[in-house]
Image (cartoon, helix red, strand yellow):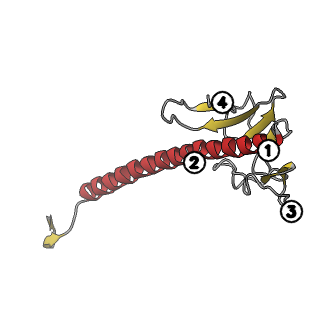
Amino acid sequence: MLIKSRKGLRQGFTLVELIVTIAIFALIANITLVSLNKAKRESRDTKRLSDIAQLRSALHLYSIDKSSYPAGDSLALGTASHLILDDSGWQDGSAPQSPIFMYSVPRDPKMKNQTTGLACTSSSTGSCDYGYTNTGDNNYIIYFYLEGSVGNKAAGLHTAAKDTIL
């Protein structure tokens, strides 16, 4: 745009034009970040459902072999001494015993960088590690937390057992 000044006509942009341009770029950046955060949340939730399906399969194989489910109450899966599922149950992986039903027990994607495990329980209200409890009636409960809705599952705390995912 041509700007008239004391020295005559010169080329350049007015301050208003520059501010409007910067505001448009800021708006586009903001929309992009919001979309990216939503995609990350949905990706973590999809991974959680996949992890729960794999855990249920491994627990089913364990129950076929042992006629029961591994012992445990409010265990934070994928942490410390609950890294693998082998012949003796949940182990740290230092000396696995054959057969190994799950060599790498998954951990909640949002909790991977946490140093200590925080197992989901029936009263959890935010992100937590998959929580396992043997209910004693030849069943178990795995608690997990979804950040957003996935399919017919709303955001919040959910449970999985040998027959269902709620």
At which x and y percent is residue 16?
26, 54
Q: Identify which residue is drawn at 48% across, 34% down.
A: 151
- Crowd band around label 1 with a 10 angstrom C-alpha radius: few (<14), some (14–19), many (20+): few
- Per the rendering, the mark at residue 65 is 1
Q: Is residue 98 above or below residue 56?
A: below
According to the picture, the residue beneath numbered tag 3 turns out to be: 94
Secondary structure, mark 4, is loop
Answer yes or no: is residue 119 visible: no
Of callouts 1 and 3, the N-terminal one: 1
Q: In which quadrant of the rendered image does the N terminus lie?
A: bottom left
Q: Nearer the viewer, mark 4 or mark 3?
A: 4
According to the picture, the residue beneath numbered tag 2 turns out to be: 47
Secondary structure, mark 2, is helix
Secondary structure, mark 1, is helix
Q: How many marks?
A: 4
According to the picture, the residue beneath numbered tag 4 turns out to be: 163
Answer yes or no: is residue 143 visible: yes
Of callouts 3 and 2, the N-terminal one: 2
Residue type at numbered disc 4: Asp
Of callouts 1 and 4, the N-terminal one: 1
Asked if the residues shown at circle 1 and circle 3 are in contact, with their CB atoms under 8 angstroms apart, the answer is: no
Q: Is residue 90 above or below residue 156?
A: below
Mark 1–mark 4 Cα distance, whole angstroms, equals 18 Å
Secondary structure, mark 3, is loop
Q: Identify which residue is drawn at 73% across, 36% down.
A: 120
At which x and y percent is residue 66?
83, 42
Q: Nearer the viewer, mark 1 or mark 3?
A: 1
Q: Is residue 166 above or below residue 131?
A: above
Residue type at numbered disc 1: Asp
